[in-house]
Amino acid sequence: MKKRYLSYQDTIDFLTEAMAKYPDLIRLQNIGDTHEGRPIMMVTISQDVAYADLKPALLYTGTIHAREWIGIELAVNFIQYLLDNYPSNPEVVEALTRNTLYIVPCLNPDGFEYSRNHFSFWRKNRRDNGDGTFGVDLNRNFGINFRQSTNTQSNIYGGPAAFSEPETQAIKQFVEQHNNIKIALDYHSQGNVFFPAHKFNHEAEIEGTDLNILCANMAKEIHKVTRRQYGIHRGKPPANLIHGSGREYYYDRGILSTVVEVGSRNIPDYLINMSQSVDENIPALLYALGTAINYSDLAPKRPENFTVRDISANHAELVWDHNPEDDGCYYQVYRNEAPKDPCTRDNLIAITSQSEYTDKQLKSGHRYYYNLRKVNRVNRVKSPFAPEVKIKTNLEKDEFSFTLFPTPEKIGYTGEFLATQNAEHFGNNSLFIGVNKTKGICYGVIDYDMSRIPTDAQIKDAAFSLYPMNRVGAKIENYGEWSVSILDPDDISDITDFEQIHNAVALQTLGDAIDSDQLTQGIWKNWRFSALEKQLIQDQLEKGRLLLRLQGPDNLPQGHDSQMMQFDIGYGRFGGGIHYRPNLDLIYHRRPNALTCNATVCHTVSHIGVTQGELQSGFDADGQRIFGHVEFMLPQLSERTDIVITDAYFVLESEATNGISQPIRFTVGMVDNDKLSYNSIKCSELIEFLGYEVSSHELVKTPKQTFMFDSSARQHLEDLHDSGKPINLIIRATSASRQQDAIVQWKTLSADETTVYPQLVVEYIERHKQPMDSPENFQASLEDGLVRLTWDNPDSEDWVGTYVVRNSFHPPRSPFDGVKLYAGKDGYTLDRFGNTNIPKYYSVFSYDNVPNYSVPATLKFSTDEVTPVIYDEFEAQDEMEQRYREGD
């Protein structure tokens, strides 16, 4: 296997030959020498390479960890790809015309050769530490958040000082001499995940959207080749982050930077796994190279103040600033239905020169994610992205929603070999799902309390969401799958008992299982319920519980020790807080009440006069129209809340048809006019038509007809009820030919004189239609290094709770546009993850049981006081996580 991999000398020979063959395209230079005297080779590739340093550039670094051979292999293959496709491939030509590639195939030549020839899993460089140990972890030796250590034996020993190593000194000097570097990609293995850089804050940064979209678009290119899905995970600062990483050093200098963890093993089978990893990453690299210019001084400025102005059930109005310097640009608007999705032509929903856009035909109660950038009209160079705007559309008038979160004691995992420890995992540890040699088979368990959902709820939509936080334990390519099953809670007496969970027979397994190459770290996984699965939720409402089991592979092939995935529970010292809790999002209807109303009065209106108690329509002896008029009066349908009319129809029955020689059609319409003069009805404009017209022929066959109210007519009916006004309906005849003495007599009383006709049937639910009052007296203060938020809740019996959200860039106008901090009945909360030294916006919303959200109370928080940020020490949940953290 190893013979198929290049040696470091093979790489130098290849690069030397390439430069000789393509002197105008490629330049090779030594940027420093290692402890053992090997040159650290930097390759520069650009059209007219003599001018390369004047163009925006992408920096590629590979194999900074000795055993991660993907870096050097991918680098050589990408260089060969560029050489083979220049100038025949227009994408390659454009990328190299506008941009420059700086590429260090191997930043750790000594360690790589030691790994290749002596110890495959060597990680560090080959510094002699003077105490019988060798090596410094070069990716802990950069100057940002460097951590001093004397444990030279450790695989993550960062060296005696920041930049103590010739390898890190060399790349530091090169980067500081090349301000044209705009993107930095550091290639590692393993994990199939992008790790974008951060500034050690649990806060969104202005470049955060750029980083996520860069990674998402690269991941899309990877997916095109092998269908493998890469994750995107920045971690949850300030806790548990590595120290002294090159990624953060580049980012600190204003360079968009990410680590790319490739594959599931450091040195995989070359012909299958390594070749796949190389092939899938080449298009992603070409994409990244082509985007460097978009983050340079040649690009338009980032759009400012991108936000949402208004949201309904089916549309969202987006607005942003348009400055005079933007006149030479247009805007691209992208929409996704999940976070960290790509922005490509597939989801480009608008190109506009305006500073606003209304997105229509959205689904009610659904989340959407919008991204915006400018494009120069002439050279088509694109700007960085505005910070992403996140919304959730309002509900339709007859819908309710509820998001269920498990309580701490109702979420955890059970392991085959862990016996009595299993109960301790609940509310504390992450969900470990799959199998390894230490824990055996492991299942995740989530037990949702359904008692807060009304028993008459009719489930319309349901989605279960889970946050994958670490896939390092899933070490086998293309092996196993992960899924979610519904269990019968009556079969389980103890949800922490492995045997009960293991032996339970699933009522249903949700949707598609996740194949191992689709496991994504850092990207929410959503299961949307099918009709059958929604019916199962309906069935569980009576039991008041929904019990979910999460399962993965349950055996290991020969020679493997782990195929385990880790998911966040949002609780305990390892959880990321409320924002990361697994949730079940439900949209439901309520069973409607039905009311049958008899007509209060009926009239026949002709040019001769008005006849009360009789209902006719058609044409008189002079060919003049005869109108039927019916009035209804709805009673007050609810004493303490609003009502929503979900369905309504008008029932009309013909008693006799006289003198109709040619077809006549009859329409029923609503009028906002209770004056019964012939001229007023003749000249009045119908507000709404009910259903479709009915012909005289149909009346002969079917005397009883039903005219349905459409959504607009139901709204008008609802308005009349709310204002206490009568409902006036007009029955009007139309004919293609002039007719005389052609009349339909409509029934006004049943034969036994017990039922009055016509009838109006109304189905309705009690539901609030107006938002709650906003919380008042919203204030922020510092308390023990945290932002404390306080407010006064509305004094209303309809108030259910308060929702608090934080946004780093603009006041949140939607409860979903930012990081959720709190939802509940208290009048205060603490921002436990935010950095108090960074200005930000907070909004607080009140809500009822629909929920309808109030207009927010909003404040901007900033302080001149500098609060120390405490970096939590890493605490592993199991041996494998500890080994990974320690570089083992």
Image (cartoon, rainbow, N blue to C red):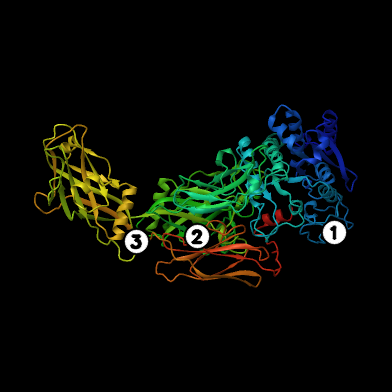
Q: CA distance from mark 2 to mark 3?
A: 28 Å
The picture places residue 434, in percent across and down from the top left corner, at 58, 50
Q: Quadrant of residue 49?
A: top right
> Which of 810/353 is in front?
353
The picture places residue 162, in percent across and down from the top left corner, at 83, 57
Which mark is first along the chain, 1 or 3? 1
> Which of 84/664 is in front?
664
Q: CA distance from mark 3 to mark 1?
A: 70 Å
Mark sitting on residue 405: 2
Q: Residues within 10 Å of mark 3 (few under 14, many from 20)?
A: some
Q: Residues within 10 Å of mark 1 (few under 14, many from 20)?
A: some
- The residue tagged 1 is 160
Looking at the image, residue 665 sits to the left or right of residue 396; the answer is left
Quick check: can you spot residue 717?
yes
**Location of residue 237 with respect to 792 vertically, above or below:** above
Q: Are marks 2 and 3 in contact (CB under 8 Å)?
A: no
The picture places residue 837, in percent across and down from the top left corner, at 68, 65
Q: Quadrant of the N terminus?
A: top right
The picture places residue 181, in percent across and down from the top left corner, at 77, 45
Which mark is first along the chain, 2 or 1? 1
Q: Residues within 10 Å of mark 2 (few under 14, many from 20)?
A: many
Mark 3: secondary structure: loop
Task: Tell which tag, 2 or 3, sits nearer the viewer.
Answer: 3
**The residue under label 1 is which amino acid type?**
Pro
Q: CA distance from mark 1 to mark 2?
A: 47 Å
**The residue under label 2 is which amino acid type?**
Phe
Looking at the image, residue 797 sits to the left or right of residue 879; the answer is left
- The residue tagged 3 is 642
Q: Furthest residue to the bottom?
A: 783
Task: Tell which tag, 3 or 1, sits nearer the viewer.
Answer: 3
Mark 2: secondary structure: loop
Q: Residue at x 67, y 51 (%)?
A: 207
